Amino acid sequence: MDAHLDLLPAGIREAHAAFPAALDACVDLDGLLRLKGAYVGRDGSHAAQLMELLKAAPKEQKRELGAAINALKNAWEEGVKARQEALESAKKALDAARNAVDPTLPPPLPAMGALHPLNRLMDRLVDVFRPLGYHAEEGPEIETEEHNFDGLNIPGDHPGRSSSDTFYLSEHPELLLRTHTSPVQVRVLKRLAPELKRRGGIRFLAPGRVYRKDEIDPTHSPMFHQVEGMLVGKGIGMQHLKGTLAYAMRALFGADAKVRFRPSYFPFVEPGCEMDVSCPLCGGSGCRVCKGSGWVEILGAGLIHPNVLSFAGIDPSEWSGFAFGMGVERLAMMLSQTPDLRLFFENDQRFLKAMGGLD
Ligand code: DAH
């Protein structure tokens, strides 16, 4: 190629001689693109000038001149390409270094855990009753028939006792997964019966997990949560139950919350009732959550059946009381307008974070 350089104009020869240094001087892709434009660009570049020259050259010179021009153009193009690759890999290395771990920094903190929304709601229920003198009690999830049924005046032939409704432990058929939190009543009454006189009464809340053989669907789960409440004292009647629960519902749902009681049957209370609260979402005017009625069912309750007190060793002619039990998922679904109970057990963090409003 160099043999033919003398065919070329002096300006081009100088530009060619300056090319390696000009290439080295390109420290970024922008600079390199400008250099590329000047040497091999479509218009006004050295290469474009050479093409003009070739066009104008006499026929017998064209071959030799063409070869010289091609050699130059190739040299420039290859030079630009090699420089471009070098710049790009240098940039990659720099980016990698920038993103690299800095071992001098303190390690990132692990994400903080938080209480599950159902646990927060149960804590809140306990907090509502605490100023009334209630404390929280716990009972085991594996129970005896005595605590889960017998001590609660539930007869031997009660359908809830059957193995189609209740999980019995196959290795220990006398044990079962408790079907409600009511057996905590039996345990606490038995435990505190000897000190009842000295204490002057008993009042507690018992939140916890319960189990039933239900198929999983949007409103059922074989494991769910209840909160049980109980008060024992002297001369306790429905008025105390109503006053207590009306207070609790106002504390939970706001000062405008109203309650109503409907007669119902549970073996461990007499009389028994169910309580509705004015729909916390529409305030009672009727909406999707209360199915237009303005009321939602919240819990079962009643005055403690004398047999329950006797079973625990408490004299029902001297002592009386009330009890209530509510489903936590139902309450949580209503408060958060969650249409599907299963969401509470999937532990999708997006859902759990959105449940912040429950407490
Ligand atoms: N244990 C009942 C259930 O699981 C709920 C209940 C009703 C609890 C009435 C009570 C009560 O303490 O008095 O359906």
Image (spheres, grey):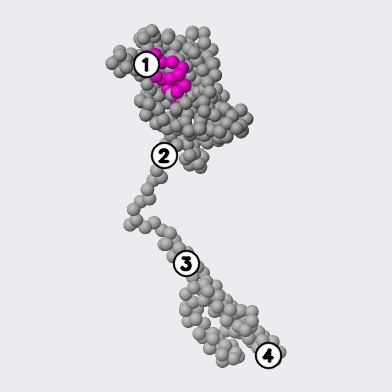
Q: Which residue is mark 1?
A: 233
- Label 3 SS: helix
The residue at label 4 has a CB less than 8 Å from ligand 1: no
Q: What amino acid type is highlighted by mark number 3?
A: Lys
Horizontal side of residue 200 vs 128, given as left or right: left
Q: Is residue 16 above or below residue 135?
A: below
Of labels 1 and 2, the one closer to you: 1
Report how far apart the C-alphas of labels 1 and 2 lie in the structure: 38 Å
User: Are circles 3 and 2 on residues that touch, CB within 8 Å?
Assistant: no
Which mark is first along the chain, 1 or 3? 3
Q: Residues within 10 Å of mark 2 (few under 14, many from 20)?
A: few
Q: Which residues are magenta?
A: 223-243
Residue 219 quadrant: top right
- Label 4 SS: loop
Q: Residue sitting at 38 percent across and 7 percent down?
A: 317
Q: In this rendering, does residue 170 appear at all?
A: no
Q: Which residue is mark 2?
A: 114
Q: Which residue is mark 4?
A: 57
Count of picture labels: 4
Of labels 3 and 4, the one closer to you: 3
The residue at label 1 has a CB less than 8 Å from ligand 1: no
Q: Position of residue 89 (x, y in %)?
A: 48, 66
User: Are circles 1 and 4 on residues that touch, CB within 8 Å?
Assistant: no
Q: What amino acid type is highlighted by mark number 4?
A: Ala
